[in-house]
Image (tube, helix red, strand yellow):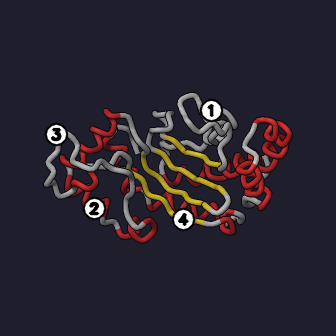
C-alpha cells in the first residue's frame, strides 16, 4: 500500500456525486472509482495512523482492512430505517479499543465528507450497562471528572465535552448533582473541526494525532470506568 499524502479532491468528488446518485446502479458502475479514490486513501491513512495511535494509547488499534478493520463500510443498514438510501455519503474510520470491537465502544473517529471534516474521540451511545458505569464513576469520582472537563488543552481544541442528553436526570441520580449536565449525557465525545484543504495534505496526520492526544483525559476516564486499560 502506498503512503498517505492526503485525501485528494477525487475522494470528496466521489461522495458529492453519490449524494446525487445514491442508488445501486450508479454505485455498481462507479465501484472501481470507489476502490481507487476512496478505499485506497482511507486504508493508507489508517496504516499511517497506526504508529501515531500507539503514541496516544497502546490499547487502541488502527487496522487497515476493508472488512473487519478500522474503515467503515459504505453500505448503510436500511433494515429498520425509513431512509432507504443504500450508501453512506461520507468516508469514516474508527480506531477502537483492542478489547471491545463494536461501534459503541470507546474509540477515536475521523469523518470526511464534502464540506464537513471532523475528528476526535469518545464513546457514542454505549449500551445501558456501560453508560451506567460511566455515570456512576462520575458520581464516585467528581474531582477526577472535574479535572477532565476543565483540562486546558481539551477545552482549547474542542470547546468541551459533547453528547446528546436526557431532558431530566437519569433514574437514581441526584438532579442537583454538580455534574448533572454530564450525567444526563447518552454519549461523551470530543470533536475538532477540520476542512477539505487540511484533509488533502500530509499534515492532516499531525493534526489528527494532536487532537487524539488532547482527548486523553476523557478517554482515560472512560476506559477506567469501563474497566479496560488505557
Q: Is residue 85 left or right of residue 140?
A: right
Q: Earlier in the sequence, mark 1 or mark 3?
A: 1
171 or 37, which is in the foreground? Answer: 171
* SS state under label 1: loop
Q: CA distance from mark 3 to mark 2?
A: 24 Å
Q: Is residue 33 left or right of residue 53?
A: right
The residue carrying mark 3 is 172
- Pointer 1 with pointer 4, Cβ within 8 A: no
Q: Earlier in the sequence, mark 3 or mark 2?
A: 2
Residue at image location 21% in from the left, 47% down from the top:
169
The residue carrying mark 4 is 193
The crowd level at tag 4 (other Cα within 10 Å; few <14, some 14-19, many 20+) is few
Residue 138: x, y in percent?
24, 49
The residue carrying mark 1 is 68
* SS state under label 3: loop
- Pointer 1 with pointer 3, Cβ within 8 A: no
Q: Name the mark nearer the viewer: 1 or 3.
A: 3
Q: Which mark is residue 101?
A: none
Residue at image location 43% in from the left, 44% down from the top:
124
Residue 223: x, y in percent?
37, 44
Amino acid at each position: 500500500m502506498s503512503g498517505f499524502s492526503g485525501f485528494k479532491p477525487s475522494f470528496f468528488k466521489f461522495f458529492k456525486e453519490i449524494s446525487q446518485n445514491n442508488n445501486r446502479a450508479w454505485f455498481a458502475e462507479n465501484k472501481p472509482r470507489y476502490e481507487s479514490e476512496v478505499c485506497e486513501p482511507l486504508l493508507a491513512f489508517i496504516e499511517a495512523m497506526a504508529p501515531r495511535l500507539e503514541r496516544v494509547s497502546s490499547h487502541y488499534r488502527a487496522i487497515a482492512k476493508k472488512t473487519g478493520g478500522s474503515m467503515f463500510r459504505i453500505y448503510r443498514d436500511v433494515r429498520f430505517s425509513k431512509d432507504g438510501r443504500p450508501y453512506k455519503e461520507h468516508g469514516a474510520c474508527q480506531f477502537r479499543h483492542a478489547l471491545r470491537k463494536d461501534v459503541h465502544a470507546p474509540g477515536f473517529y475521523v469523518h470526511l465528507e464534502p464540506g464537513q471534516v471532523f475528528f476526535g474521540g469518545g464513546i457514542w451511545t454505549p449500551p445501558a450497562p456501560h453508560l451506567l458505569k460511566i455515570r456512576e464513576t462520575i458520581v464516585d469520582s467528581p474531582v477526577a471528572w472535574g479535572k477532565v472537563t476543565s483540562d486546558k488543552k481539551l477545552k482549547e481544541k474542542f470547546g468541551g465535552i459533547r453528547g446528546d442528553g436526557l431532558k431530566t436526570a437519569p433514574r437514581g441520580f441526584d438532579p442537583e448533582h454538580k455534574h448533572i449536565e454530564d450525567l444526563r449525557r447518552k454519549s461523551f465525545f470530543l470533536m475538532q473541526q477540520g476542512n477539505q484543504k487540511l484533509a488533502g495534505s500530509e499534515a492532516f496526520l499531525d493534526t489528527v494525532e494532536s487532537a487524539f492526544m488532547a482527548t486523553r483525559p476523557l478517554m482515560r476516564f472512560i476506559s477506567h470506568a469501563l474497566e479496560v486499560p488505557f
